[in-house]
Amino acid sequence: MMNTAGTNVRSEQLEQYSTLEYILLGDLRDLLEDSDDEVTCKWLLAVLEALLDTLPREFDLEEQDGYLLEVLENYPNWVEEVNRLRSQHGSLFNRLTELREQILRRTSYAAIADQLRRDLRDWMMTLIAHHRHENRLLQTALNLEVGVGD
């Protein structure tokens, strides 16, 4: 069992990674609205690299000591939903890696820019939906009172 100091450090680190992720997603949104030039492409790659560095660290911290353990302690029958969310960590990272590789393999950024914009926006929406689902599941587990009656 982790002590309070360890939990606080982990919570602070997780908050820092979440904040960095939020900033990087904002940068990514801005870049997707920029022109189709090589300078934009270089910045886009830099943001993707930073996200590819940040996401695994954030996911590892979330999974340390049990992913959504608070949910499973209260509702062990929600294990399938928790496992599905945990498995999304790998698919989110892998998809972002594929998109970065697509940029690296390109002959011209302008030639792939429109499709890449769509793909990156889809990826961002999937990541945001994932975080919302995690938060909703956690809030529901902590606030739901089952079995209370007359």
Image (cartoon, rainbow, N blue to C red):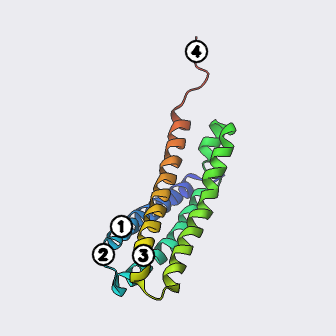
Q: Could you tell me how far apart the alpha carbons at marks 3 and 1 are, in whole angstroms?
A: 10 Å
- Which image quadrant is residue 101 in? bottom right
- Residue contact between numbered discs 3 and 1, judged by CB atoms under 8 Å: no
Between 115 and 22, the one lying in front of the other is 115
Are dots 2 and 1 in contact, CB under 8 Å? no
* Residue located beneath label 3 in the image: 47
Residue displayed at 60% across by 48% down:
68
Residue 142 placement, left or right of 25? right
Marks 3 and 4 sit apart, C-alpha to C-alpha, by 52 Å
Tag 2's secondary structure?
A: loop
Q: Which residue is drawn at 40% across and 76% down?
A: 113
Neighbor class of circle 4 (other Cα within 10 Å; few <14, some 14-19, many 20+) is few
Q: Mark 4 points at which residue?
A: 149
Q: Name the residue under label 2.
A: 34
Sooner in the amino-acid sequence: mark 3 or mark 2: 2
Position of 80 relative to 106 (above/below): above
Kindly report which numbered mark, 3 or 2, lies closer to the viewer in this rendering. Answer: 2
Q: Disc 1 designates what residue?
A: 29
Ranked by sequence position, the earlier of labels 2 and 1 is 1
Query: Which mark is nearer the camera, 3 or 1?
Result: 1
Q: Which residue is situated farthest in the top direction here? A: 150
